[in-house]
Amino acid sequence: MKTMTKICQECGVEFGPTRGWDAAFKARTYCSTQCHGAHVKRVSRANLIEDVEWIVDHDHPDSVAERVGYKDGRSLRDRLYDIGEPELAEKLSRNLERYRNCVEAS
Ligand SMILES: [Zn+2]
């Protein structure tokens, strides 16, 4: 019988079933949990960027942060720098400044 293999969607490596052709293998699209983890991480990063871009200019940075699961605008900004989105981080930073000035002026 011909061995069935699949191509990992993350790294492109060909992989075969470790315990035979079963349902678990049939459902798998990644060669390893590591590859699957990398995929999940990338998706959530993309989602985060998309969400922040969408609301960053319409809400207080702390509210923006809360909506995407971060404690406050500052921690979200740090996270954006971490994941390589300095432009978005600076935008958030500018808004933080702007709102702070507003509070001080009023
Ligand atoms: Zn892989």
Image (tube, helix red, strand yellow):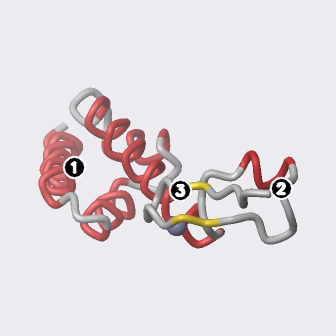
* CB under 8 Å between discs 3 and 1: no
**Would you say 37 lies left or right of 10 here?**
right
Q: Amino acid at mark 1?
A: Leu
- Residue occupying image coordinates x 18% and y 55%: 93
Asked whether 78 or 3 is in front, the reply is 3
CA–CA distance between discs 3 and 1? 40 Å
- Quadrant for the C terminus, please: top left
Q: Which residue is the site of mark 3?
A: 7
Name the residue beneath numbered marker 1.
92
Secondary structure found at label 1? helix
Between 44 and 76, the one nearer to me in the picture? 44
| Residue type highlighted by circle 2 | Trp
- Name which residue lies at 42% across and 56% down: 42
Instruction: Determine if the C-beta at disc 1 is less than 8 A from ligand 1.
Output: no
Residue corresponding to mark 2: 21
Q: SS class of the residue under badge 3?
A: strand
State the image coordinates of residue 89 (x, y, percent, origin top left): 21, 56
Marks 2/1: CA–CA distance? 49 Å
Location of residue 2 by image quarter? bottom right
Q: Is residue 54 above or below residue 103?
A: above
Q: Which mark is residue 52?
A: none
Q: Earlier in the sequence, mark 3 or mark 1?
A: 3
Pick the quarter of the image with the N terminus: bottom right
Pointer 2: residues within 10 angstroms few (<14), some, or many (20+)? few
Kindly tell me whether mark 3's CB lies below 8 Å from ligand 1. Answer: no
Q: Nearer the viewer, residue 75 or 8?
A: 8
